Structure formats: structure tokens, C-alpha cells
Amino acid sequence: MATLIILGGGTAGTMAANMLRRRLDTSWSITVIDRDDHHHYQPGYLFIPFWMDPERVVKPRGAQIHDGIDVVHAEITGVRPEERAVDLADGRSLSYDWLVVATGAQPRPDLVPGMADGSLWRDRVHEFYSLEGAKALHDALESFEGGRLLVHISEMPIKCPVAPLEFAFLVEDHLRRRGIRHLVDITFVTPLDGAFTKPVAAATFGDLLEDRSIRIAPDFAVERIDNEAFTLNSYDGRALPFDLLVTVPPHTGARFLVGSELGDPMGWIPVDKHTLRAVADERVFVLGDASDIPTSKAGSVAHFATELFVENFLAAVEGKELPESFDGHANCFLESGRGKAMLLDFNYDTEPLTGRYPVPRVGPLSLLRNTRANHLGKLAFEQIYWNVLLPGYQMPVSATMSMAGKVPAGGK
Ligand SMILES: Cc1cc2nc3c(=O)[nH]c(=O)nc-3n(C[C@H](O)[C@H](O)[C@H](O)COP(=O)(O)OP(=O)(O)OC[C@H]3O[C@@H](n4cnc5c(N)ncnc54)[C@H](O)[C@@H]3O)c2cc1C
């Protein structure tokens, strides 16, 4: 009997378990370990402050994981690669032959002084990167009557790096619909030198922010939140006043990985970015947000990478060369308010380009353009997530980035 343990039953862990169960014979046991039985559709957090029913984003984890896969509910406290063992908070240790780490990225509001430990937390200081946070922010927005609103990214990397921009556009639209937009001064505060990491997308989003009269405060390295003065303070001495602060806390990998044998000081696991095999141990693969690959931490990346990983894993257990090479392919929808959205398609080497997606020259989605079809595509993704992605069914889109029909922004 060979044993595969998958740490984390979120997006990547669930897909990997379901895909591999269909490909590995019964001499393999597959066990997924996660702390609880609640699978969250995290992209839904973005909409909860505005209109989405919070109950809609949570389903039982066990129901997403297919028959023939064991599920263990426990807090993972450590991995001992040399002994091929995983330690759990309840005192158990489980042995494996092969390990997949898919424990994601964790928002850490405890890392900014005055954030989670301040008196304004969940009062005037909010976040939407957790279910509780998104619900509390919904209530705060209902009673918000105007003033200075900061939408803030603490530091990179974070999950879904476009989500803070989406929130800025959606909140602007929300306030406009409530008839109080003119009473609110919105500033997008970022550690980056522009609206986004990729220059072409940064210019496009920067124009959109300007168009919506949302200011941008770039190069802002947060030092602390001053809960007495109601200011967000940076290391270079800036203090931005706020009436409502919507922040995205710093992220780390799972706590048990921080500074561990597998993880770096921030808990990200160094991997070969094309095979997703851990640098520290060839019996370990890393999927989803948990690794250090230089692309977005996004469900789309988890999906594309997991598809290619399956072939590599099957080759690895047979001692063969790994056949597939992941290119960092990411698809990111960006809600821009007023019932429209943009779509980005990029990889390790290529900037987001214009063109159509998923069928070259046909679409129906448009890259780097603000369209109604893109918005409907983002909404439709929720059903695709539960019914196609998580069960591990093949999607009619390529896991690697296609260049067919694409042109650089401004090109013909
Ligand atoms: C607000 C928001 C909006 C987003 N929007 C989009 C979007 O539009 N498109 C997109 O592609 N992506 C989006 N994402 C990102 C996407 O949700 C993540 O990239 C994706 O879920 C990553 O999958 P994962 O399997 O790596 O991690 P996760 O899905 O987070 O799963 C990790 C799992 O590991 C478990 N775990 C961690 N540590 C332990 C431990 N010590 N013990 C036991 N269990 C543990 C957790 O409970 C969790 O179930 C969004 C994220 C957020 C927060």
C-alpha cells in the first residue's frame, strides 16, 4: 500500500485529491487533512459587503471530496520530511510516502501593530479576506454616512491581488447608488508604485481609478494603525486619516510552515516553478497559494497548476522524468462596478494582453477590456467552481497560456 497525504482541503487540495483518486489504483490510499468541514468559496467574500448572502459561500468540505478518499479533521502542527511524517494538534502523527502541501495563504492582521489588537478592529478598521470580516464590513457599510474611506493593501504577496482594487470600484459604485458618493473621499493605499504589479495592467487600472475619482497613495509601507488618532501610518512618516479603513492584512503561509524545514521565513515553500516539486524534498509537491512561485496567488493558478501536477505526480511515483512544465498561467477577473468587469490573462513571462478568451478572436470574454460579458463570466464562475473545478473535471480551457489572437495593449 502506498500512502499519499494532502495537507489542506481547500481549492487545490480538493482538486488534487479528486483528480488523483481517478488516476491512482486501489493500492494507493489518499488522505486529505484540514482543520474543519467548511469549504469556503473565497471569491464570494468580495460580494458579501454589498449583496451576497454569506451562507452561499460555505459548503461541507466532505461533500466536495469524492469516495475512496479519507478525510481527517485536525490542525496540522508540523511536517517532518526526513521521517515522512505529519504531526497533528491532537497528538497523532501520520506517515506518508508522498506529500502534497496545499495549505494556502493566511491573512495575518496580528502582524500590523494596531490592526487586530486595536480598539477600532471590526469597528472602523475592517477586512473582507475572511467570512467574519466580510460580514462585519457589510454592517459597517450599511451605517457609513460619509467621510474618508481608505482601501488598503498591507504588503505583497496577498491572495487574489486584484481583489482590493475590485473592492475600491465596487464600494465606489455602492456609495453612488446610495446617493452619498459625494460625501466620501476614497483613497487606494498600496505598497506598490502603481495600481497593480504588472505595468500594462497598472496603467489600465490607474486610469479607471482616476475616472472614478479614487485617489491613489502609492509606495505606502504600513508601520501601524493609530487607534487614537484614526490614522494609517507608514514607515516614511505619512499618516492618512480615515473614518473607515478597509485593509488587506499581510499574508504568510500556514503557521506550521513559517521557518520550518520546508518553508521560508514567511512560510512559503520554495519549489521548482515549472514542476511544483519542493526544493527541500522530492517526495513533496506544493499546490495553490502555499508555494513561492512568482505568479498571482489565485484559484485559477491553483486550477491550472493542479491539472499539470497530476501528470507530473504519476511520472514521479514511477521514477520517470516529469513531463509537464507549468508556465505560471493566471486568469483574473476584475470587477469594476456598474455591472462590468475586466479579465487578465498572463503567465510568468507575459504581461496581460488584449484579445479574446477562451476562444481566440471569438471570446465571449474580452481581455483587458471593461465589459458586461466579463462581469457575467465572473458571476458564472461560482457554479463552475463547485460543479466543475472542485470535482476535478476537465475545463475547456488550456492550463498553459495560449498566445493565439493576442496582442500587446495598444497593438493591432
Ligand atoms: C476576497 C478574495 C477574493 C478572491 N477572488 C478570487 C477570484 O476572483 N479568482 C481566483 O482565481 N481566486 C480568487 N481568490 C483566491 C483563491 O480563493 C485562492 O487563491 C485559492 O483558494 C487558493 O487555494 P489553496 O488550495 O491554495 O488554498 P485554500 O483554498 O485557502 O485552502 C487552504 C486550506 O488549508 C487549510 N489549512 C491551512 N492551514 C492548516 C492547518 N495548520 N491545519 C489544517 N488545515 C489547514 C485551510 O483550512 C484551507 O481549507 C480570492 C481570495 C479572496 C480571499
Image: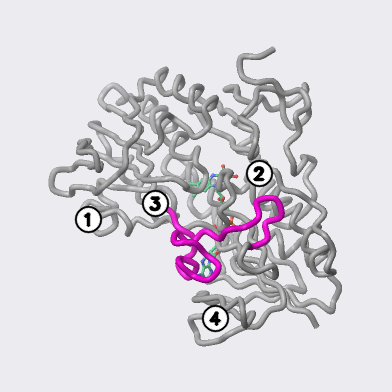
Mark 4 to mark 3: distance in Å?
A: 26 Å
Q: Is residue 193 above or below residue 68?
A: above
Residue type of the residue flagged with mark 1: Gly
Counting residues from the N terminus, which is met first, the one under dot 3 or under dot 1?
A: 1
Residue type of the residue flagged with mark 4: Asp
* Residue 118 circle label: 1
Q: Dots 3 and 2: beta carbons under 8 Å?
A: no
Q: Please state if 118 lies on the left or on the right of 9 as rendered.
A: left
Q: Classify 10 Å Cα crowding around label 1: few (below 14), some (14-19), many (20 and above).
A: some
Q: Quadrant of ligand 1?
A: bottom right
Q: Residue at x 80, y 49 (%)?
A: 394
* Residue 328 circle label: 2
Q: Residue under label 3, please give it.
A: 250
Examine the structure image and report whether residue 255 is included in the region drawn in magenta. yes
Q: Residue at x 29, y 52 (%)?
A: 122
Counting residues from the N terminus, which is met first, the one under dot 2 or under dot 1?
A: 1
Where residue 292 appears, as percent x and y from the top left, is 56, 53
Which quadrant does the N terminus fall into?
A: bottom right
Q: Is residue 217 above or below residue 226?
A: above
Q: Dots 4 and 2: beta carbons under 8 Å?
A: no
Q: Residue at x 56, y 69 (%)?
A: 37
What is the span of residues highlighted in magenta in the rendered image? 249-278
Counting residues from the N terminus, which is met first, the one under dot 4 or under dot 3?
A: 4
Counting residues from the N terminus, which is met first, the one under dot 4 or under dot 2?
A: 4
Q: Residue under label 4, please give it.
A: 87
Q: Please state if 330 lies on the left or on the right of 158 as rendered.
A: right
